[in-house]
Structure formats: C-alpha cells, structure tokens
Image (cartoon, helix red, strand yellow):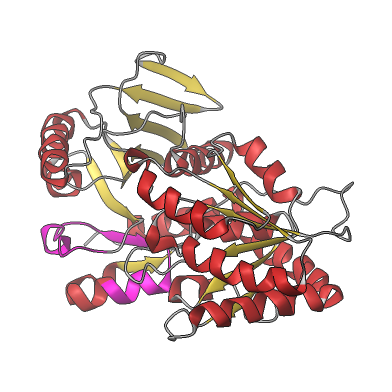
C-alpha cells in the first residue's frame, strides 16, 4: 500500500521543538513502513533539514511552509496558499492522510490520489462542509465525533474514532524508582493557559497543603502566547496565588526523553482542563499513565475514552461552583489511599499500552484497507 501523509505548512518533521502532532505521525509512519508499506511524509521545508531524505524507511519530502503569526485570518490565508501550491505536487498514492485546514478541499482534484483521510485533532469550527469529497474523518475521541456530527451530519457515515498514539517505549515506568517516597510530588504538564485550569489547581493545592504540608506541586509548560500560553500576566497571577506554598514553575520540556523523566519522578499527575471545546483528546494524561502515574482530570468527555474514575484515574466535576473544593478532595483522597492509588497506576499503565504507535498504526491500516476495498 502507498501511504502519503501531508503534515501542513507549520512544523518541521522530525520536530525541532514542540510539534507533538508531528512526532506522533512520524512514529506511526515508521510503523507503517516497518509493516511493509511505502510511506511518504510531505512537510514544510526547514533550514536544518534537507529537501528529501529517508529515515527509518519513511521518505520525507519537504517544500514550502510558513511561520505561525497567531493571527487566525493571516494564518488561514497562508495555509490556503500552501494548499493551492501543494495539491498539484501530491504524489500518486493509495491513501493520503491530511493534517491541514485547506488541503482537504483541493486534494480530491488530484487524479492519482485514491482515498483521502483527514486526521481530526481539534474540535470543529464549522468548516467540515468544505470537505465533501473526503473519504474518512479519523477523529481522536468520541467527544470530537459527537461535536462534528452535530455540526455536519453528513460526516457521520465517514467518521471513525482512531485515538492519538504515544510512545510506550519512551513513556514507561522507571523500574528503579518506587513511588513510596514522602513527600509526594503532584505534576502538571501542559500549556499555562486559563483554559487549562492551573489557577484552580493551585487554589486546590493550598487546601491539600494544610493536610499534607510536605507535598510539592510542580507545573511544567509554556507561558508565552506564541506557544499557546496565557502570557506573563497569567503567570504572575499563578505565582501570586502560590506564594508561601511548595509550588515550582518549570520551563516547557520539548524533548520526549526528558519529559518522560519528569513524569517518572512525580507521584501524581493532575490535568484540570476547563476547555469544553478545546480539549480534543488529552495526550498529557495518557503519557503520564504510560509511566505509571495516576491522572486526576476534569470531567471532560475526551478523557473518558481512556480514564475510568477510581480504576485508571480520578475525575472531579469542574462544572460545579465548588470545583476547587472538588479537586482538593480528590487530591486528598489519592494521597490518603496511597496503596489503592499505586494499584491504579498499574492499571493506568496497562490501559496506556493500548495506545502504542504499533497498535494505532494497525488500526489505521485496517481502516485504509476497508476504504480501498470500497471503490465507490
């Protein structure tokens, strides 16, 4: 099978910094190649990367591309230019996987592209009527499937839930470290933005500290707006709330190996996202689970695909007026019942193992075969 993956105009592949989506697709593409398929990744050009090269059996073709401006209108125009210029250069392929806004509009015009799959990694914003000729919408969670169906019912027969993968070889438990130490460390990894609920976490941690004064909260992630953060004012607000408590703020970690170490040296993971229409999957909690960490998450639908309350993680109701108290109670419960929490960590790891690059690549390949068997 010939498989081409179009990554869009924004991030280099392999990723130079950040670019979690690109790293995921690089891992899946390498699994496709290892299973005997001919794989090409189409991505932006980048000064430190050659226009073409082969890495682990995957052919990389790099041309064009832009830098984000954080101005949605300008970025959509740039993406449109990229799609118009890229569409005629698409290779002959059985399957074209697209991670881009405009390319699904123009790719169906290419006579040598048999089937088009749009990888849906974000909540819809009303654009799916543009994609009438797309053969498959591969959505990362059931929550996204529901959201797209509500906006664009015609997509329903063309949707399939195929989760995002993680590297279960990089993100794995540290066999040497034992999470029996005192004091405990609660970890947050992600963008430092109000929609992520970090201010709620700090307020809850203040209550937790009254009962567990030696417990530490470590917050890791970008604050700069160009990296999706909430800006310096939000960071100042967080630091003011954390004054007098054992809270550490750390720079974002882009290297997967170093990120895995951050998970491995923590005891609990908390991801209190408030983003009702912004949280598409929840990769950070899943990576934490892969290292044996028990995740504590808000009650967003996307987390329910892989977190079962009291079995593979803890959930709190972020929609209640006393959400902060709810979160504090759950954190205290996890710390008080440590033997049970450790047992949950084992189950969390087992669940995360189902999201390996190989397992998700296999799901995609089965769907590709089904699409190609349907000639209509």
Residue 225 spot, x, y in % from top left? 33, 43
Q: Residue at x 18, y 31 (%)?
A: 86
Residue 135 counted in the magenta span: yes
Comparing 303 with 49, the one in front is: 303
Could you tell me if residue 280 is visible in this image? Answer: no
Comparing 211 with 88, the one in front is: 211
Residue 88 spot, x, y in % from top left? 14, 31
Quadrant of the rendered image containing residue 170: top right
Q: Residue at x 67, y 49 (%)?
A: 168
Q: Residue at x 29, y 34 (%)?
A: 10
**Image quarter in which the N terminus is found:** top left
How many marks on residues?
0
Q: Which residues are drawn in magenta?
A: 124-147
**Image quarter in which the C terminus is found:** bottom left
Give left or right: position of 133 versus 27.
Answer: left
Give left or right: position of 38 versus 4.
Answer: right
Q: Residue at x 19, y 28 (%)?
A: 89
């Amino acid at each position: 099978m010939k498989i081409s993956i179009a990554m869009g105009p924004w991030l280099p592949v392999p990723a130079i910094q950040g670019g979690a989506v690109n790293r995921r697709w690089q891992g899946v593409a390498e699994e496709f190649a290892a299973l005997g398929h001919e794989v090409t990744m189409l991505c932006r050009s980048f000064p430190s990367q050659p226009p073409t090269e082969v890495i682990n059996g995957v052919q990389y073709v790099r041309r064009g591309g832009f830098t984000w401006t954080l101005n949605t209108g300008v970025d959509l125009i740039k993406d449109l230019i990229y799609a118009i210029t890229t569409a005629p250069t698409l290779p002959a392929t059985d399957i074209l996987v697209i991670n881009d806004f405009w390319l699904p509009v123009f790719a169906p015009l290419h006579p040598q592209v048999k089937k088009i799959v749009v990888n849906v990694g974000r909540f819809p914003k009303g654009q799916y009527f543009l994609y009438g000729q797309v053969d498959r919408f591969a959505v990362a969670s059931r929550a996204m499937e529901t959201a797209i169906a509500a906006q664009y019912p015609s997509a329903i027969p063309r949707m399939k839930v195929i989760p995002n993968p993680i590297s279960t070889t990089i993100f794995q438990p540290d066999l040497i470290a034992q999470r029996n130490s005192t004091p405990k460390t609660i970890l947050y990894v992600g963008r430092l933005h109000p929609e992520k609920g970090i201010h709620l976490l700090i307020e809850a941690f203040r209550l937790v500290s009254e009962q567990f004064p030696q417990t530490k909260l470590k917050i890791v992630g970008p604050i700069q707006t160009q990296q999706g953060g909430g800006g310096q004012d939000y960071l100042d607000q967080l630091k003011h709330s954390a004054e007098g408590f054992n809270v550490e703020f750390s720079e974002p970690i882009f290297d997967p190996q170093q990120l895995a170490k951050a998970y491995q040296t923590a005891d609990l993971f908390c991801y209190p996202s408030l983003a009702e229409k912004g949280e598409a999957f929840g990769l950070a909690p899943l990576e934490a689970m892969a290292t044996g960490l028990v995740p504590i998450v808000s009650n967003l639908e996307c987390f329910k695909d892989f977190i079962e309350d009291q079995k593979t993680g803890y959930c709190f109701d972020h929609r209640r007026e006393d959400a902060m108290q709810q979160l504090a109670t759950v954190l205290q419960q996890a710390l008080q019942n440590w033997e049970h929490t450790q047992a949950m960590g084992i189950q969390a790891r087992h669940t995360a193992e189902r999201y390996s690059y190989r397992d998700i690549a296999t799901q995609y390949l089965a769907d590709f075969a089904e699409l190609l068997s349907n000639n209509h």
